[in-house]
Image: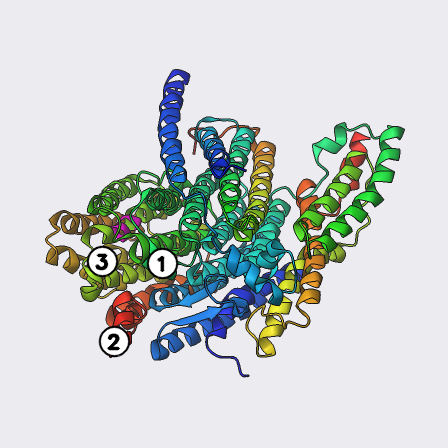
Amino acid sequence: MDSSGWAVGSRLGAVLIAVIVGLVGYAVWTFPSEFSGLSDHAIAELQHAGTSNPVTAVLLNYRSYDTLLEMAVLLLAVLAAWALVGGGVNEVCLVSEVSNPVLRGFVRVMTPLSILVSAHLLWLGDHAPGGAFQAGAILASAGVVLFMAGIDWSHKLPAWLERVLLTIGLFAFTGVGIVLMLTGRSFLEYPPATAKWLILMIEVFCGVSIAAALVSVFLGGRLRSRQTVLKKGS
Amino acid sequence: MDTRTFFLYAVAGVVLFGIGFHGILFCRNLVRKVLALNLMGAGIFLVFVALSTRAPSGTPDPVPQAMVLTGIVVAVSATALMLALIRRLYRETGFTELPCDLED
Amino acid sequence: MPLEVDAAMMGLVCVPLTAALLVFLTSTRAVAAWTMVTSAIQFGLATWLTYGVLHSGPLQYQIGSWTLPLGITLHADGISTLMIWMTSLVGGASTIYASGYLSALRRGSKLPVDARLVPAFWPLWLILWAALNALFLSGDLFNIYVTLEMVTLSAVALIGLAGRERALVAAMRYLIAAMTGSLLYLLGVGLMYAAYGTLAWDRLGGLVQADGPTLCAASLMTAGLLVKTALFPLHYWLPDAHANAPAPVSGVLSGLVLKGSFFIILRLWLYIFFPLLPIRAGQLLCGLGMAAILWGSCQAIRQQRVKQMIAYSTVAQIGYLFLIFGIWDGWETGLAWRGTGYFMLSHACAKAAAFMVAGSLMYAVGTDRLEDWAGIGRREPVLVFAFGLAGVSLMGLPPSGGFIAKWLLLNAAVAGGHWMPALVMIVGGLLAAVYVFRVIAVSFSDQESSQSIVPVPLALRWPPLLLALTMIVFGVLTTQPIRLLEIGTPTTAVAEVSP
């Protein structure tokens, strides 16, 4: 298609999409302004959920199956990047100022702090906004920032540990589900007495896996960085 | 809060969705397509969250909030896969756009 | 408490998922063997579930024992059980085939796949399998979104494994189309939840009303799924993606992955939206289906590369699935319902077999250009025979599953006085005969191709024949699949309640 045809198509598309937006907007307009959805159910069952944060209860108890599959989706992204890109440090690292002492000093202070914040968010998820994904994202950002400051922390990681870190969240999740099933409960039906601790355990392992997955995706699919590539830039 | 405030947020979400949709169809650069896809996703999440604030008790409905969290992780994964594919495609061919036709 | 048959549903998701993790974690040389063991377990579980559903009716499983509307419920009714059994059959054959294909690669064959990417194949394939099972079992619209994404991402990654320019471009195009489709679907899910406060499809069926949000949600979800199912004219991404993927992946994509999104359309329409929508909406889908049959078949006839031809044939065969919305004759008669269910089964087996044959002959000859296949039939009679059998099913000739499916659909169309779909079905069968016979004729032509022919290993020769023969078996033994399809439909549910 030549560029003028493209421009006409683009305008027509814009008009069409505006119509769709208008229709969906109208549909939203017709919604009543009060609607409780499932919030009453969710809050009524909270005492059996093993957590006092309703969002965490939905994520890791009522609809834990979604979260389990979501972990699989994340692992898929890593596997795909692993296969397609095959590791190697991102170009971003190569252009960063690896010799900047201020940046390095700042990162050295920030990293322990980030790890602390991440752990705090994980714990907070039990009763306030927070949880595994937020914690994992902060942890991963700490790992990424280290790379951007030119600190290669993962090249010495053993190959087996890399794989264990990536999969441990999903292992813990399915493992808990299957073990509960073998004890005569249904899949991921936590016993009320231990629900809180099982959820916390799953969240810790998932948080680690999420962080590992996000860093791996940044590094082109491998958590273990390839030093050779990094040296080229420094 | 005015009882119809949710509508403003929800419509903003729908508009974001539309902008992203247009970008997916009509931006040629692949990285822009990734951005458009994320914009579309963000719009949808905004609709989810805006519509969840209508609970009469005042506490927003936690179910759509949890669905948004799940949706964000899915969107992150899809973005990662797309970027990986773009990197590989660039390494292999130097393309930053999808070609209209390929020679055999 | 011993594990009941409804636990098999959870096993169908957890076993391949755990196996994928173990395969990724250990990365042993015996990966293919382990995957075959997993396939056998899957087949056993699927058969167990099928047996259970046939004997005790539709099953439900509440995950975490949370009841609706708060929790997620898995449903195994007739159609989803049939799909799962089909997945385990085609998946098992694909696993054996893939092991042969990948070890051929390791020996340095000229197959168009990047050998460095092979280790990633098994975990991706197992996750795809888990995702398909989860998709067919899911009773929750948002959960379906997550499983759809799982299916898409693993399918895209598997296409990307081919690693060449054409495959990467095709994978990219597929990913963009499929992601857009998923997001349209997701917005629809959001509207449905905001309107009705539940996401379970069996509940929504009784709640929905024909108001603005519902119609909006129905259109968005249907449009998104149509992109994923590649109904004409949204099929633009399909031929390249399916033709350039590694052969075992092509079979799975055409046979199973497309069925996943079509299955959701079927669920949404027949169980939730059909009574609300104007009859024109169904006729529109049916019309697009007819266009797909004619366009896809004509394109298939024009192709010079066999894999591209089979991919266009898929575009056509997808069209047949959508005829149901124009020739729908209700649950009581159920001819259209049974025909469509049977069509999904027979197309999955036939198309996977056809792609496998194409991959094997590509291994033998080195290309999939039709002219280079001249005389191949005398060197590889088993493979060409398997292709012929698959072709019989694609054309809809007896005795094959494709014939039964088409016969049921044709009966439904004629009984309802829908002459156009009936005519298009017959023409589509004739067009399919043209492209199938073109391949057979070239294979048995007298002139030998100049290409040197490599002998095909056993694992590349027998799985397609197995699938094609299964299709013939289903052309003769029709009672069990038909009975299975009737389990859990709204009529039987009503019949069970009122004594």
Toward which corner of the image does residue C86 lie, by quadrant? bottom left
Type of residue at label 1? Ala
Q: How far apart in space, not on screen, are marks 3 and 1 (Cα)?
A: 14 Å
From the viewer's perspective, is C346 left or right of C398?
A: right
Inspect the image, locate mark 3, and give the three-letter code of the amino acid beneath it: Gly
| Element carrying mark 3 | loop
Please give left or right for residue C434 compared with residue A190 in the image.
Answer: left
Residue C97 locus on image (x, y percent)? 47, 60
Classify 10 Å Cα crowding around label 3: few (below 14), some (14-19), many (20 and above). many
In front here: C106 or B62? B62
**What percent of the width, then of the height, locates residue C145?**
47, 51
Determine the CA span between mark 2 and mark 1.
Answer: 37 Å
Point out the tag, 2 or 1, that comes first from the N-terminus: 1
Quadrant hosting residue A7: top left
CB contact under 8 Å: marks 3 and 1: no
Dot 1: chain letter: C
In this orientation, which residue lies closer to the viewer: C249 or C70?
C70
Tell me the amino acid under the disc marked 2: Ser
